[in-house]
Amino acid sequence: MRIHTYLLPTCVMCTFLVVQFKSVSGEMFSALADMESLVSTEFELVKQLDNYIQEEETRLKRLRGFLEEYESLYHEASADVSKYLANPVNAYLLVKRLTSDWKKVEKVVTQNAGSDFVKNITHHQSLVRFPSDEDLKGAAVALIRLQDTYKLDTHALADGKLLGTKYSRQLTAGDCWELGRQSYNNGDHYHTVLWMGEALNKFEQETNKTVSREEILEYLAFSTYVQGNVKEALQLTNELLKTIPFHQRALENKKHYEELLREQGIISPSGEATDVSMEMSEPFDTANLKLTKPKGTHGLPIDEWNNYEKLCRGEKLMDPEIEGQLHCRYVTNNVPFFFIQPVKMEEAYLKPLIVIYHDVITDEEIETVKQLAKPRFKRTTVRNSVTGKVETVKYRISKAAFLKDSEHDYVLKISRRVGLITGLDMATAEDLQVCNYGIGGHYEPHFDYARKQETIGFNKDTGWRNRIATWLFYMSNVEAGGATVFPTLNVALWPQKGSAAFWYNLHLNGEGNVNTRHAACPVLTGSKWVSNKWIHELNQEFRRPCGLRFDAEM
């Protein structure tokens, strides 16, 4: 007697079913009584095959749904890629679709012989670019950074609205859950509560569920507790236990929450509520919770950090008297060419002097510089003031490349133009740095010059000393966000394609000017392109202009 084992694949939510059949040699056909048993066998086969086909049809229907969704989103994105990706919500969703969402597709496909399809996709990953889990994490953190900096309402953001304007489709409960999960993994329970709460409310409204209610409640309950809301954490935990009565962590947490509430007198020793309901209210409203937002000042005085965020949001903080002293004018710097076509200069601040020069780089030059830089883009870095090592950091999110004057005639002309306008010797200037900011791209408040304990501004090989001045070209307009701000001066410079900002980092005595600490605000919508020249000391001190508006305080 031989035994054959048949493995029948089933749906995603089911286990593989093993059906065993015994085949008998001879004598089955010689007796109808034996044949009758085969009818039962056939019935079982038909039933199992029908079940398998139904499960496969369900699986294929899910895959067809994924396909239609991806096709729809692709057509939306490909209509205008730049405009689509300029929206940070769209950029986040694109990364999410190609990371965590794509894993769901792979999981459904691999339930059958479709594993060959997954292998082909894996093979193609070496030919095309796929975002990583780190990209998903970065995109989520960027979206939360924008939420905080620009005070974006969680519900409005989940509905695809930025500053009152609808830019993208709504986030699903699953999208919100992923943002909450990323926040949780970063130890940020404040945003976990906001996004899991939004996920829970969206879950109740969804016909086609994108995440399970249990997954939401598990994160939401614990983070609500960590934020100091024990009663609400117990309510959420009770909701979780209604669905999964033997959830071990939930049972342990429930016991702990009840003990805390007994100590507070909110529930009696018998477990009865004394003055509040233990039932969760619907819809779930985070406004009723006590939530503590992470400070996130990154070593800056709180007032300076608050100014930074206010300036990024476009709040006017400058004293009207100071603003009233600022002027615009044409300058020539005694350069013959500028007598024919003077340079437009706008004063942004006087002490220290910060100016904006308008129409100082052409569209053709901008496009050339961008094309030269793109193939060499790398994640921007900073030099650790303690170890001296170059490293990537969370407070600077962009990609950059450096271009030498010798690489293109336009790069050389740009460098010379900066020298003619500023009157500084470009022989001691660093190569042109070209930067592009991604989703929520930013650079938190920092100095361009090296402080006494640092060496970033010095070049031992050339003998250059500190960075005396910064020239910053704006190579794109930005729809929202992306300003260059000086928090201690209450100055905000907004990107205007073709313009450039210029300021001195050092006093005339060579000491760093602490008021030049500046930041690149997160880009809310649009793509921000800039390029800059850092100009070093080396007989530059006497090239600086003097006069009433150019005194030693600048």
Image: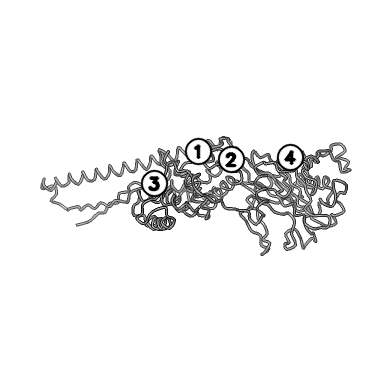
Colour scheme: one colour
Camera-side mark, 2 or 4: 2
Name the foreground residue: 146 vs 474: 146
Camera-side mark, 3 or 2: 3
Quadrant location, the N terminus = bottom left
Residue drawn at x 38%, y 54% is 268
Residue underneath mark 3: 279
Residue underneath mark 4: 498
The kind of secondary structure element at disc 1 is loop
Q: Position of residue 166 (x, y in %)?
A: 56, 35
The kind of secondary structure element at disc 2 is loop
Give the alpha-carbon distance from disc 2 to disc 1, as whole Å.
Answer: 13 Å
State whether residue 352 appears in this view.
yes
Q: Are marks 4 and 3 in contact (CB under 8 Å)?
A: no
Number of other residues with Cα within 10 Å of mark 1, as a class: few under 14, some 14 to 19, many 20 or more? some
Name the foreground residue: 87 vs 462: 87
Q: Position of residue 346 (x, y in %)?
A: 79, 40
